[in-house]
Amino acid sequence: MKKIAIIGAGNVGIAAAKALLEAPDMELCGFVRRKAKLVPGFENVPAAKSVFELPEKPEGAIITVPSRLAEPIERKLLENGIYTVDAFDIHEKLSAMRKRLDVSAKAGKVSAIIGAGWDPGLDSVIRTLMSASFPKGKISTNFGPGMSMGHSAAVRAVDGVLDAVSVTIPLGSGKHARKIYAVLEENADKKAVEHAILSDGYFEHDECSVEFVKDVAPFFNTEHGVFIENIFENQKMNFKMRIDNPTLTGNVLVSAMRAAFLQKPGAYFMPEVPTCDFYAGNLETLL
Amino acid sequence: MKKIAIIGAGNVGIAAAKALLEAPDMELCGFVRRKAKLVPGFENVPAAKSVFELPEKPEGAIITVPSRLAEPIERKLLENGIYTVDAFDIHEKLSAMRKRLDVSAKAGKVSAIIGAGWDPGLDSVIRTLMSASFPKGKISTNFGPGMSMGHSAAVRAVDGVLDAVSVTIPLGSGKHARKIYAVLEENADKKAVEHAILSDGYFEHDECSVEFVKDVAPFFNTEHGVFIENIFENQKMNFKMRIDNPTLTGNVLVSAMRAAFLQKPGAYFMPEVPTCDFYAGNLETLL
């Protein structure tokens, strides 16, 4: 049984913890949180401010903090010989981040799997398979409707925002609109906050609108989905899912953690890893 | 450009040849056929009775003969240092065959990817991903309706059968019926032929019926499909395709040929290979 720590105890961290409890080959040895408080529902699991303050040093760590905070934490873990996975979702920064994590991973003689949520993650493996099946097909990825955890976290990180939810609305052919519900901090400047949100890299490519509300609870719903299609002449293939967003993200992170232990030192995207490495069972039953 | 030979020039062999013409990294250097005749539409491509009689020795070979004839051909190629791929589809014999091909591949210091059509092949990679996403979900694979190339070839190989088509009909929940249309040879014993077909390993697990006809042409249709579903509580994911069967099989074989060159010596199933190895393009565009 590999000992695994979870960094962050938000929706995804909790979901990853639940997935670890079901995994036959790994066990949860601690949470790392800003305030070192025990996590409700996991009172028998140690919590600390740093991995290095946990009672047992983990062999692997699942990073569930917001994407923009992940890299320095992850590099330190890798350099200290701890395998890592993350669900980093800022697509245009993936390659550069991979290069830096690759250096850290090789220094620590361990490996990292990056972008291991469901997009890029799972969806990028599906797109790779679809491209191999119909190299000249036209692939589109359509998200939602549903709340994006990465985009919601990005809005929450904007100065003047107390809480936020960002909902992804599919427009077809891989295009999306985003509706952002945000609660302003007292005395915050509405115009400045709206401008800061809309000019963030998470939002600048899509059609977005911001609505300031008193409470985001009515808009908070973890059900999400994707429809990925490859069309070549009169032939079609598609992958579709309706899922609970943190649950699926947690499951994919745990499967990626399993796979990380099987790779040579370095940092990997999910399509670079044999798919059977993600799977705990007997491959022959799936053939 | 890697030089590739195609063994067999039936529907799948022709489709693989067309896929090779589109591949940026491989070129077709010959067909191997029982009668060494040039292949219609590919008159400028050499044809021979053996790979070793082609003007150029290929670096890889795509095996498109019926599954039951594949192994001895493939082992000889591997032992002679030629990378191979096949679309072997007799699921219960995959593991044993892989072990034997693994020995041959290592002896020839090359690799083989086996079962690289769309089932096991592509579908087994999808099932592996779905299991990693929802380890406790219930996966079902539903084929068709459509003509099965492997099953049709198996009926054609029965003594007393002149020609045949086997159609797969999905019954739901991963169960199937098979309707077999067969043309009898003159003087063949109907009862004996029917018994031989129904007791074949390709058919013994399903609900099958045989109809003897004068001509199978009205039943010959290469459109096929699959619906693979994983259901976990109220969450669902599915992969669906409607495709031209030989075209997709040819495309997957060519993608697997590309990947074979990137593996260490040995024999592999598709889920054991990083998915990006199947893909000719730039991985970053799919992230």
Image (cartoon, coloured by chain):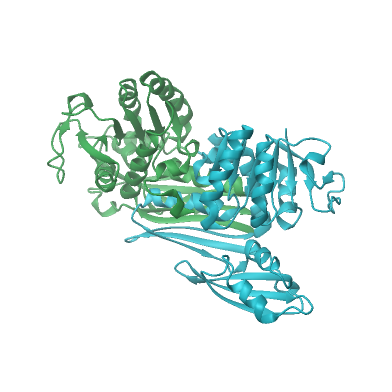
Chain colours: A green, B cyan
Q: Quadrant of residue B222?
A: bottom right
Q: Residue A100, how many percent across, how many down?
A: 43, 22
At a point 47% along the width and 70% down the height, the residue shown is: B172
- Where is residue B252 shown, x and y percent of the image? 62, 48
The answer to whether one can see residue A172 in this image is no
- In the picture, the quarter occupied by the N terminus of chain B is top right
Q: Would you say B28 lies left or right of A270 here?
A: right
Q: Is residue B56 visible?
A: yes
| Position of residue B162 in the picture relative to residue A241 (left or right) | right
| Camera-nearest residue between A55 and B158 | B158
Q: Of A156 and A260, which appears nearest the observer? A: A260
Q: Quadrant of residue A285?
A: bottom left
Compared to residue A248, the image places residue B109 above or below, namely above
Instruction: Name the residue located 30 percent from the left edge and 32 percent from the top edge.
Output: A60
Which of the two residues, B247 or B191, is positioned nearer the viewer here? B191
Residue B263 or residue B23, whichever sits in front: B263
Give the residue displayed 60% in from the left and 41% down from the top.
B112
Q: Position of residue A123 (x, y in %)?
A: 47, 46
x then y, percent, for residue A90: 42, 35
